[in-house]
Amino acid sequence: MADASLLRVDDLALHYQTRNGVVRAVDGVSFDIQRGEALVILGESGCGKSSLAKTLMRVLPRNVHHVGGRVTLDGVEISALPDERFRRDVQWSRMALVMQASMNALNPVVKVGAQVAEPLRVLRRWPRRRALERAAEVFALVGLSNDFMTRYPFELSGGMRQRAVLAMALVAEPDLVILDEPTSALDVLTQASIMNVLKRVKRELGTSFILITHDVATSSELADRVALMYAGELVEVCDARRFFSEPAHPYSRMLMASVPRLRQRERPQSIPGQPPSLLWPPAGCRFAARCPERFASCDHSPPALPLHERHRVRCWLHALDNASPVSDGPRSTGEEGTHDR
Ligand SMILES: Nc1ncnc2c1ncn2[C@@H]1O[C@H](COP(=O)(O)OP(=O)(O)OP(=O)(O)O)[C@@H](O)[C@H]1O
């Protein structure tokens, strides 16, 4: 059967070289996104979410030790493209990234409208006037008055600057927009209005999104699917409704139990312990040291096991559910770890 995915990511890796050794920030990550779908990548601070976004967009720091894996966009293996072609044909035009805190990175001496129009001037070589006309349309789409086209960034509030950054990402009509913590610096009302803008863009333009956040409440607003990241790996990838109602991985369950709810008698539970160092991650399950359900098999790294359609869980408990004997299943990761496939 033909692959209907817009984006397919297989075995993605990003390791950094540091003075203390190699940091395995992204370590064998696989998932796919269909057209018009929003995937939320959820995980606590330092688990590798931003590194994953930067790997997909090839926005990498100098101390990269290893980049691996295969990324396919609309059937084309974009990970195999030379940098120059990737920049020309993919970056911003087909896949755009709104980086963490990018609303503070607007050029302070260039009017906002001109900055939003710039991708069209650079990528498509559109004349100034045509690019500004298109920018004005996108201003309306993200709920910014056209009056702000001629203002400088310091004249806009944080919420308006975030809308402007979003407009810049959308102006060339990419298939996929990656948003790294787009609302974490904003108050709750502004957060809600930005999430409404994203929902509208998704509905009206059919844009696919990867939304990166540590905030479960924000994620539930937009998500069609959820990928939960822990210590450089995806531990569960599934339909959002299922994730929020019956999460399967012990970490997913504990994370959901840690979220405060209005009509809940029990207190939110914290998760004892800390994630492992990504310099020396354990050879077995990376969550085992914090997991109340760990057992002997957890000394071996679990693969991503299929539970339902497009639902994978990296946990040996589900190998038992699937009646596949653990003695046949576990593989020691050795140096490279197991992967999501
Ligand atoms: N350039 C770098 N060199 C070395 N280590 C890095 C570099 N960038 C990130 N890291 C490390 O990689 C790991 C993953 O970092 P990353 O920023 O991707 O996580 P994150 O989940 O996005 O965190 P946050 O939500 O706090 O932004 C962390 O241990 C971090 O310290």
Image (cartoon, rainbow, N blue to C red):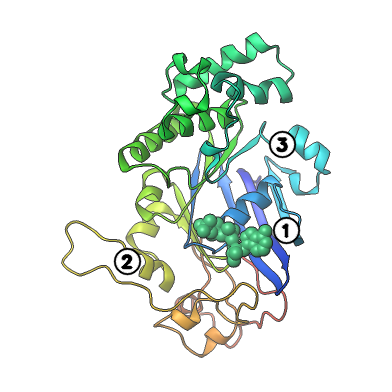
Q: Is residue 310 visible?
A: no
* Badge 1 amino acid: Gly
Which residue matches tag 2?
258
Local crowd at mark 1 within 10 Å, few (<14), some, or many (≥20)? some
Q: Which residue is mark 1?
A: 69
Q: Position of residue 168 (x, y in %)?
A: 57, 28
The residue that appears at 70% across and 20% down in the rendered structure is 121
Of labels 2 and 1, earlier in sequence is 1
Tell me the amino acid under the disc marked 3.
Answer: Val
Q: Residues within 10 Å of mark 3 (few under 14, many from 20)?
A: some
Of residue 308 and residue 10, the one placed in the foreground of this image is 10
Residue 108 place in picture, x, y as percent: 57, 29
- What amino acid is at disc 2? Ser
- Residue at screen point 15% across, 67% down: 265
Q: Residue 262 is drawn in which quadrant?
A: bottom left
Residue 41 lies, in percent from the top left, at 50, 54
Instruction: Give the Cα distance between marks 3 and 1.
Output: 17 Å
Instruction: Tell me: residue 300, above or below residue 223.
Output: below
How far apart are the alpha carbons under marks 2 and 3? 39 Å
194 versus 100 height, above or below? above
Q: CB at mark 3 closer than 8 A to ligand 1?
A: no
